[in-house]
Image: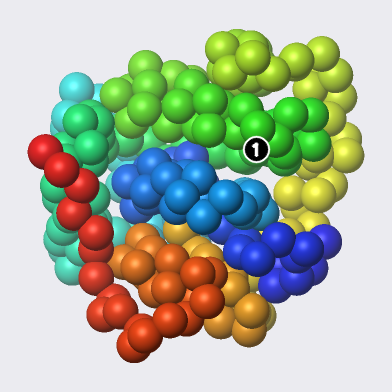
Amino acid sequence: MNVLQSDSPLIVYVDVKSPYAFVAIRPTLALEVELGMKFDWRPLTLDIPSYLGSAEKKEGKVVASSGRSPKVWNAIRYSYGDARRYAKRQGLILKGTEKIWDSSIANIGILWVVEQDRDKLGGYFDAVFPPFWRRELDIEDVDVVKSCLAAAGVDADGFDDFQSGEGRALHDDLQPQFHPHGIYGVPTYVIGDEVLFGREHIPYLRWHLSGQKGPAPDIAYEIEPC
């Protein structure tokens, strides 16, 4: 699978453990419905310790930390605060994670749903993202991910083998391709030869996918009704 190529008009890269991906899911799904299109949703499992260091919390207090300067901590706090504002406008709860999760199994679940029953992808996202960000979901447990598949109405039979075999291979094949192709975070949208990071590009995506009528819109977050 080539990270920049798809039969779909738009590729969307997300990671369950990203707060910015979390607040982009619903607006991007809504755009998909609005335009009557099916986007190509794919996982990008972030290697957060490689660029932001690592940390673990218990009851809100840091109990272990490595490679995080005060500047990095401030940037992380700002990122969560920024994402939390947009989560609140969608009626969602976004609590900071207490460790850096391995989200690969839940992300491989995206590939499984696309393969098994693409129309239930939104249901899978609803079963995974909101409870994870309420700190209610162990996304490193394959049985928990299977329960999320079942909650979305997706047959989970065979997922054990998929997440350790074919699905894992597809997932792992994508990962080393990202940085060389200018993809560093989520959500990332690939449209034609453009790589766009962040949900602030949704107005532009709508304009582009709708035929580019009139001037291109400004790059800005769309504000959902309260």
Q: Is residue 145 left or right of residue 125?
A: right
Q: Nearer the viewer, residue 221 or 72?
A: 221
- Image point (20%, 31%), residue name: 91
Q: Is residue 168 above or below residue 134?
A: below
Q: Is residue 115 visible?
A: yes
Q: Is residue 114 above or below residue 10?
A: above
Identity of the residue furthest to the bottom in this view: 215
**Label 1's element?**
helix
Residue 59: x %, y % from top left = 19, 22
Residue 52: x %, y % from top left = 37, 61
Residue 161: x %, y % from top left = 86, 24
- Image point (24%, 59%), residue name: 222
- Image point (88%, 39%), residue name: 166
How many numbered circles are shown? 1
Residue occupied by mark 1: 110
Its colouring scheme is rainbow
- Image point (37%, 36%), residue name: 99
Going by the numbered disc 1, the residue's amino acid type is Ile
Q: Nearer the viewer, residue 214 or 60?
A: 214
Q: Nearer the viewer, residue 199 or 170?
A: 199
Q: Which image quarter: residue 4?
A: bottom right
Residue 189: x %, y % from top left = 52, 66
Q: Which image quarter: residue 156?
A: top right
Identity of the residue furthest to the front in this view: 213
Q: Is residue 106 visible?
A: no
Crowding at mark 1 (Cα within 10 Å: few <14, some 14-19, many 20+): many
Q: Is residue 66 left or right of residue 4?
A: left
Quadrant into which the C terminus falls = top left
